[in-house]
Structure formats: structure tokens, C-alpha cells
Amino acid sequence: MISRQQLIDQIKQKKSFLCVGLDTDIEKIPDFLKAYPDPVFEFNKRIIDATHDLCVSYKPNAAFYESRGVNGLQSLIATWKYLPKNCLNIIDAKRGDIGNTSDKYARAFFDESASGMSFDAITITPYMGSDSVTPYLAYDGKWVILLALTSSTGSKDFQYLTTDQGFLYEAVIKKANTWANADRIMYVVGATKSTEFTNIRKYAPDNFLLVPGVGAQGGNLEEVCRYGMNADCGLIVNASRSIIYASSGEDFADAARAEAQNIQQQMQIELEKAEII
Amino acid sequence: MISRQQLIDQIKQKKSFLCVGLDTDIEKIPDFLKAYPDPVFEFNKRIIDATHDLCVSYKPNAAFYESRGVNGLQSLIATWKYLPKNCLNIIDAKRGDIGNTSDKYARAFFDESASGMSFDAITITPYMGSDSVTPYLAYDGKWVILLALTSSTGSKDFQYLTTDQGFLYEAVIKKANTWANADRIMYVVGATKSTEFTNIRKYAPDNFLLVPGVGAQGGNLEEVCRYGMNADCGLIVNASRSIIYASSGEDFADAARAEAQNIQQQMQIELEKAEII
């Protein structure tokens, strides 16, 4: 559990608003790890050991674990247990369903006694509306991170549709603001569209924004900060592949640390520029 | 694997277009089943044994299994293995993510060698656009069932937004029709809004529609058929709680059969009215 203020404190202390995305693909990890009983967990453990002082958040992508069935779920549970509990630990699951089903997903990811895991936050897709979101908010102190504007090619198909309430992604933010305040809800905003941040900040001035796409998906950190940062920082910027696969050799953890440090140093410059630290 | 024609043949043979939703909640199944090593699988097995000649489809809801961690996933895998392979076996997972992540979810639900399961179809949420859908279509003969119009209270939040391409749910269908034809894509259409079927059939005349909400969510079968049926039937109507929890006692499977038969008989009347059988 990590509150908005605790997150802000972590950002100031670590001079970083980096989230390390654990999109761990068993086919991409170094061969020598395959000698371990749970190679994916062993990989994640070493990535976490190498980066935890440089980031404020970790984000396993559920699909990468689910694709391996029971073994994958065991890797995910082991990874959750190992995550530093002063970080914002996000499950990137992009769930979204009716109320009684959302209750069950909340249990899957927020209730350790039911599933073995209790993440601090979950990514949610908004198509089904309020039912998709409110059951998670029943868990004291947990966060919903709602998709608003994503950075993939398909994002253009619907998110930019002009509705009677602005672009669809604007309508999503405006409506979701009526469900929870900035202490409980964040938005996913794709980093390849930095000028859109100005627009999003009109509707979500205080919310933290989770920004995927710096690194492999090609976002620009300086531009994201120029348009998206608020007085509390208000940004968590994710990098996955560029960090965790920085090297494919035995030095992968050192290479991940070097890349995380590189990003942290750029973030420190941005935090200083904005006089947040 | 079940093709459009095979599905139509099943419907004619069984005189039914019923899907049994396996939203199996360990807290709601009869106590005596708790003596079995996998009570949820034991429950599902008996439901399947009692209903397989009356329905053409089964649809486990992933959340109900995920909420129980590794045990739940094992119940889901055992259930998939037991499902009759001449039925359309749908995993109700409502996933939706960028391409490389959709690849992994496809593996989780379509690739037995990776995850232990290979469903025929998966429900998908459209917010992230084409990336959310096309990776599943790379699996020969597998189906995507895309959310269009749902029946929960939250459906009004976004699905009815007026866009420059009609209601959002209309824009979704129009765009998705450019990704795949009626042999590979179905739409979820909520049964509480039967008059909307006429509208949806304008854009999706040939597609099968998966209709949740007959039963516990309160849809009306006759009205759904009047507005939604096409020359091939074109409907799969789901019932979950009304069937699987028809009795909470030791006679639960018999009660489930009686309720499934009740729905099947109504379906037969509709199929005869439409001269499909």
C-alpha cells in the first residue's frame, strides 16, 4: 500500500519517477538462468536487486506470466512477494468487466489471502464504464490506473473519436474523475503524443499519469515532462524492454542498472528544472 | 476449433443456441463438493455432464478462476480439458492490450502447449483498437468476440457516446468489420436493449452475436430473437447464474439441466418460428 504522499516522497528521495516494467519473456532471458527452478522469477529478482534504488514503481505485465500457465502464475506470485513494498507495485492487467466480475479480478490482484498477491494498483480499460472501476476502489488505499490515451497504432481507432464530450479519451477522464479523486485514480497516457499532455492536464491537473512508451516505444522524456509534469511531479514513466533486455548476457542485471541509472539521471534533471527537488 | 458452419450445424442439431456461463464461485457451490480435491472442477464437470446436449457453447469467466490464484488456474485448465470439443468453448477474459502483449494473451488462452488451454474464442475489449484484436486472428480458426454493447449499468458511460461515426458501439462494429469477417469475429451485445439489435444488425448482418444477460441480468429471449436473429440464427445466448445455481443442494446438476432444458425449449420455438429448423 502506498499513498499519493508516500509516492511523492519516494520520488523526491530517489530523484526518480521511473517504473520498471517486468514484461519478462522466458524466451528472451539469458540461457544460464534456465538452470534455476523458476528462471523468470530469478531474472526478475536480479532486475529488482539491481534497480530498486533507482525507481519508484514496478509493473509486471500479466500477459507475459499468463502465457505460461501455472508456471507463469507461480513466477508472478513469487515476483510480487519479492517486490519492495515501498514502491508502487502495479499489475498491468488491463481488466474491465461488470461489477460482480470486477470483484473477482480485484480479489485476484488485491487480496493476498485469495490469490497470493496484493498489488498496490491495477491498470483498467474503461469500455464497460463505472462497473469496471468502482469494485477496485472498495479496497482501501489501492489504486486504479485507467487507460486514457495509449501509444500503440490501434489507439487511433477509437480513443481519438470525436464525441459530444470531446475526444473519447477526454470523455473517459472527465467521467472517471466523478468516480474517484487523484488519491485513488491515475491515468495511462501514451508518451508518443506529448502535446496531448497539455490537454489532459486540463482535465486531470492533480492525477498521476502512468506513461508507457519511453524506451522501446519511442517517447521523449524531456517533452513528456515539459507538458505533463505538475507541482508534485504527477508522472510515473515506465520503461520495460530498454531496461530489462539492456544486455542478453550474464551481465544483464548490471546493464539494466546502467540503463535505469541513465533514465534516473535524466529524471533528476527534470525534477530539478521543475524545482520539485 | 469450431467453424461458423459447424456452429450452425450444432445449433440445428441441438435445437439450441445456449451458452452455459461457468462463472463458478467456490463460495456458492454445494458444500458436499468441498470433499473433492478440486471442488470447482467437480462442480463444472457435473454441470457439463448435465447440459452438454442442450447447449452449443460453454463460457468460463476467467475472473472467477483467477481470484483463487494457482488453485483457480488449475480448475480452469481442468475444466477446459473436460469441455466437449464440438461446442464453442469461449474464455470470457475481456483482454485488450498492445500487440506484443496480445500475442502473450493469445498464447495464454489459445496455445495448449504454452498454458495448458486452447479455447475456441476469447472475449476482447476494444478500447486499444486493432492491436487488441489482430494477434488472436493469427491463430487459424480461432474467434475473437469483441465487446460492442454490454448490459451493465456502466455501459451507458461510454458505449452510448455520440461520435462522428454514430454511437461508440456502432463505431466499434464498423471498424472491427474491417479487421475480420463473420467467420472470425463475433460481437457481445447486451440483452437488456433488444431494440438496439435492429440497429446492430445494420452493421453486422452476418456476425454471430454473443448475448449475455438472459437470466440473472434480466433479458427477454423472445425479444432478442425478434430483433437479433438472422438466417443462420446468428445468436449465442448466455445464461450463467440462472443455470449453474438453479439449486444450491446436492441436486444442483439436475436443477441446472432442468433450467437449461427450459431455455433450450424456448430456443427451439424461436428457431422453428424463424424456420431455421
Image: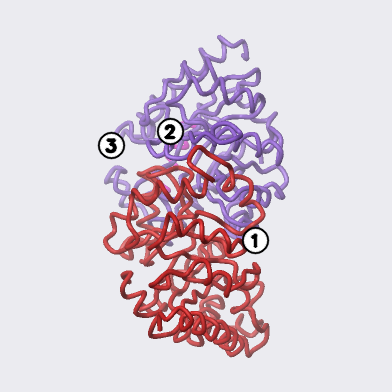
Chain colours: A purple, B red
Are marks 2 and 1 in one subunit? yes
Question: In the rendered structure, which disc, 3 or 1, sits on the residue that comes first in sequence?
Answer: 1
**Residue B203 sits inside the magenta stretch:** no
Position of residue B184 measured from the top left corner of the image (x, y, whole percent): 33, 60
- Foreground of the two, B240 or B219: B219
Q: Neighbour class for label 2 at 10 Å: few (<14), some, many (≥20)?
A: many
Q: Neighbour class for label 1 at 10 Å: few (<14), some, many (≥20)?
A: some
Side of A165 relative to B166 (left or right): right
Residues rendered magenta in the picture: A41-51
Type of amino acid under label 1: Asn
Position of residue A191 measured from the top left corner of the image (x, y, whole percent): 46, 27
Type of amino acid under label 2: Ser
- Foreground of the two, B174 or B262: B174
* Helix, strand or loop status at disc 3: loop
- Foreground of the two, B152 or A224: B152
**Residue A43 sits inside the magenta stretch:** yes
Residue drawn 59% across the image and 11% down it: A274
Res A203 label: none
Position of residue B62 measured from the top left corner of the image (x, y, whole percent): 51, 62
Residue behind mark 1: A100
Side of A47 relative to A35 (left or right): right
Residue behind mark 3: A248
* Helix, strand or loop status at disc 2: loop
